[in-house]
């Protein structure tokens, strides 16, 4: 995928963060660049411009920033998917796999109504464990997960393929090799 504005160049790569061997893809530089941020949000929502989307679900924490902008652009509501223990009202919870071990994420049980069309947003998809958990959580309360959007794909880790195997269309704007 090519853009006249080089979005990939706006992502900063930090070696050995948070631990040795990881190349951390830092989107704070992209978001701090007004043109790059606008372009990234516009490109993410492009396939759904003009179609009815009820809610955008963002995954804590960078998915909140992008998801808020995407929701505004689509005239949709925004719902947060958070680490356990952060949401104040009645929640539903799911365990999901991380690189080492498992964690749990939650959303408010009444955040999405059955049959609502929802787009899931996060900054990056790697193994897909986080997004897979989020899709299962959304489906548990009857959401119609129309798509999942990420700025960055790490295709070697197979996350996007995992979501597509769950019948979730995946949109990403750039890919980096490796992990
Ligand atoms: P995964 O569940 O393996 O798909 O991991 C996705 C989540 O971990 C996202 O919320 C990302 O923000 C974060 N993440 C995983 N790998 C990286 C990386 N190399 N650089 C930045 N964030 C990452």
Image (cartoon, rainbow, N blue to C red):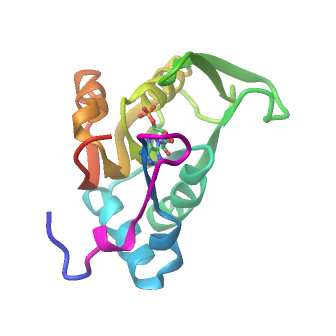
In the displayed structure image, the side of residue 28 where residue 125 appears, left or right: left
Q: Write the residue at 30% across / 66% down.
A: 43
Q: Is residue 66 above or below residue 132?
A: below
Percent of width and height locating residue 39:
35, 75
Q: Write the residue at 34% across / 60% down.
A: 44
Percent of width and height locating residue 133:
49, 23
In the displayed structure image, the side of residue 88 where residue 22 appears, left or right: left
Q: Write the residue at 47% across / 20% down.
A: 136
Query: In the depicted view, which residue is nearer to us: 56 or 75?
Result: 56
Would residue 15 be counted in the magenta stretch?
Answer: yes
Q: Is residue 177 above or below residue 142?
A: below
Percent of width and height locating residue 23:
40, 49
User: Can residue 25 be seen from the camera position used here?
Assistant: yes
Residue 45 found in image quarter: bottom left
Query: In the depicted view, which residue is nearer to us: 165 or 25?
Result: 25
Report the magenta residues as a range.
Answer: 6-21
User: Can residue 50 be seen from the camera position used here?
Assistant: no
In this view, the residue farthest toward the left is: 1
Q: Quadrant of the N terminus?
A: bottom left
């Amino acid at each position: 995928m090519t853009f006249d504005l080089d979005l990939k160049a706006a992502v900063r790569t930090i070696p050995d963060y948070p631990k040795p061997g990881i190349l951390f893809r830092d989107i704070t530089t992209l978001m701090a660049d007004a043109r790059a941020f606008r372009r990234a949000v516009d490109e993410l929502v492009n396939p759904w411009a003009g179609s009815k989307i009820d809610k955008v679900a963002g995954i804590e924490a960078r998915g909140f920033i992008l998801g808020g902008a995407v929701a505004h652009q689509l005239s949709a509501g925004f719902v947060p998917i958070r680490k356990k223990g952060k949401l104040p009202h009645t929640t539903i919870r799911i365990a999901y796999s991380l690189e080492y071990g498992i964690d749990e994420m939650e959303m408010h049980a009444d955040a999405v109504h059955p049959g609502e069309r929802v787009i899931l947003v996060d900054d990056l998809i790697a193994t897909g464990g986080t997004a897979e958990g989020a899709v299962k959580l959304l489906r548990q309360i009857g959401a119609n997960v129309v798509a999942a959007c990420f700025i960055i794909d790490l295709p070697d880790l197979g996350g996007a393929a995992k979501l597509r195997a769950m019948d979730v269309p995946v949109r990403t704007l750039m890919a980096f090799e490796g992990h």
